[in-house]
Image (cartoon, rainbow, N blue to C red):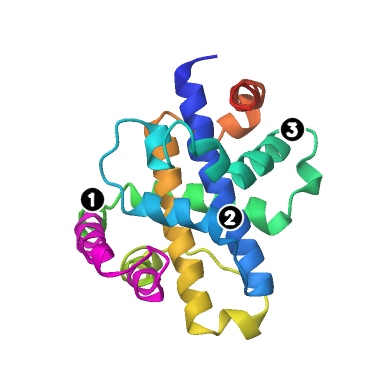
Amino acid sequence: MSNREKEQTIALSAVFQAAELVANLAKTGQVDKTYLQPLIDSVLILNADGTEDIYGGQWDCQSNLAIGRQITRKALGKDRNSVNPNTLRYALSLIHLESKLSKYPDMLSQIGQQITQIAAKKEHYDSVLHENMMASISGMYQDTLSTLPFRIQVHGDSRFLQQAHVANQVRAILMAGVRAAMLWRQLGGKRWHLIFKRKALLNALESRS
C-alpha cells in the first residue's frame, strides 16, 4: 500500500461525503453542518501542503470525513447494496463531471479567479456556511459547471429543492464534490480503480481507522 493510495482515499471519501450530503439534503431539506463545513472550506483552499490539510489536517481529517469514509468503505466492499443509490449516482457523476471540466482550461481559470474573490469575502462573515458565502459558491457553480453539456440531475423533494437556500447548498456541495474529484484525479485516481483496485483502496481506508 502506497502513501498515494492513502491520499486517494481521502479525496474519494470527500467525493462520497458530498454525494451523501446532497442526497440527504434533496430528500429532507436538512444537512449536517459538521460534515458540510470541511467540504465547503476545501473549495476555498487553493494551496495546501498535503491532502489531509485540505480537509482539516492530520488530526481532524478523519473525523471531518467520517461519513464519507464510512460510505466509501461500503461502496467498495460487500455492503454496496446498503448505500443510497442516489449517493452512488452522484459520486460517479461528480467524477465524470470533473473529467469533463478538465478539458476546459478557460473555465478552470475562471473558477480559480472566482474562488480567490469568494475567499476574500470570507473575513466579512462569521462562518463559511453563511448564506451569502454559500450563495457565492452556488453562483460560481451555476456560472461554470452548470454550463457544461453534462449536468448532474439532483432528485428529491421539490418542496425543499425549490427553496433558494437549499438549492444554493446543493450547488455549493456539488462544487466541493468536484473539487474532491479533481484531487482524486490529480492523485492518480481513475474511475476503473473503483472496480479493479477496490482491495488496495479498502486497505488504505482501514489503515486510517
Residue 2 spot, x, y in % from top left = 49, 15
Residue 49 spot, x, y in % from top left = 30, 31
Above or below — where is 208 with respect to 169? Answer: above
Mark 2 vs mark 1: which is more N-terminal?
2
Mark 3 vs mark 2: which is more N-terminal?
2
Q: Amino acid at mark 2?
A: Ala
Which mark, by number, is residue 77?
Answer: 3
> Hey, which quadrant is residue 154 in on the image?
bottom right
- The kind of secondary structure element at disc 1 is helix
Q: Circle 2 is placed at which residue position? A: 19
Relative to 119, 163 lies left or right: right
**Stretch of the chain drawn in magenta:** 112-136
Relative to 4, 133 lies left or right: left
Quadrant in which the C terminus appears = top right
Residues packed near mark 1 inside 10 Å, few (<14), some (14 to 19) or many (20 plus): few
Quadrant in which the N terminus appears = top right
Magenta stretch holds residue 111: no
